[in-house]
Image (cartoon, rainbow, N blue to C red):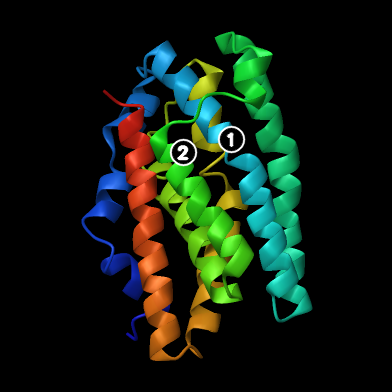
Amino acid sequence: MTETFTDWLRQRSEPDWTAVVTHPFTQGLFDGLVPVESMRSYLVQDYQFVDDFLALLGSALAKADRYSSRLAIAGSIAVVTSEENTYFQRSFDALGVGEADRVRPALDEATVAFRDVMNDANARGSYAEVLTVLTVAEWTYLEWAMRAPASLPENFVHAEWITLHNNPGFQGWVRWLCGELDRIGADLDERERARCLRLFQQATRCELDFFNAHWQ
């Protein structure tokens, strides 16, 4: 069986990739045992990616080479601005997060680093490079969330963060992202493939650093 471009990228991003998708923070989510303060800080910081992530999706929308790809990306934009945003607001209410921390919190070093990666890809990246960062962000979350047991924690803050990232719609979106990056990657030259690999490894490391920052 021929190795896909995304498999090639993932395999060359070990051991960080496996460290992300099996991180102790995710097991804490499955068990409902992430401390309240850790969950609070994690979600506050994660919410600071939403605007940058939407901009990155917008960049993909603009740089895509065909209409069907733009339709798929537009569907993801709709999810981020509806179901996911609603989850954040409900969780912030439950966790007692004030307006300042929702809108303009002090940023962790790991948050700044990942935002820089997203913003750089948005400003200067090719369609393949934008897809690379999006794929890491979404695929790692699908991989850890698919490890969740059938019995979820009672606290919706934990349970819904899991189901947001392993439901059939999200699975289909990640399959599309990987397939799209494989399609585009098939026509890349060696220099372009190398740039995508560096970005994939960098984004994977950012995901690991972000989990580490909220799991002491």
Q: Residues within 10 Å of mark 2 (few under 14, many from 20)?
A: many
> Would you place residue 82 above or below residue 54 in this image?
above
Q: Foreground residue, 54 or 8?
A: 54
SS class, disc 2: helix
Q: Earlier in the sequence, mark 1 or mark 2?
A: 1
Q: Residue at x 59, y 13 (%)?
A: 97
Q: Which amino acid does label 2 sit on?
A: Thr
Q: Is residue 4 visible?
A: no
Q: Indicate the amino acid at tag 1.
A: Gln
Q: Where is residue 125 in the image (x, y as percent from the top left)?
A: 57, 70
Horizontal arrangement in the rendering, residue 167 relative to residue 10 (left or right)? right
In the rendered structure, are the residues bearing label 1 and label 2 in contact, judged by CB atoms less than 8 Å apart?
Answer: yes
Between the residue at mark 1 and the residue at mark 2, the CA separation in whole angstroms equals 8 Å
- The x and y percentages for residue 124 are 59, 69
Q: Residue at the location (40% across, 86% down)?
A: 191
* SS label for mark 1: loop
What residue did someone put label 1 on? 48
Q: In this view, does 195 lie above or below 107?
A: below
Residue 201 image offset from top left, x and y in percent: 34, 62
Q: How crowded is mark 1: few (under 14 residues within 10 Å), some or many (20 or more)?
A: some
x, y percentage for residue 107? 49, 30
Direction from residue 110 to residue 76 in the image, left or right: right
Q: Identify the mark at residue 157; answer none if there is no mark.
A: none
Residue 178 visible to an observer of this rendering: yes
Q: Which residue is drawn at 35% across and 71% down?
A: 9
For the C terminus, which image quadrant? top left
Q: Is residue 1 above or below residue 146?
A: below
Q: In this view, does 24 lie to the left or right of 128?
A: left
Q: Residue furthest left?
A: 15
Foreground residue among 106 and 132:
106
Q: Up-down: is 171 above or below 100?
A: below
The residue that label 2 is drawn on is 111
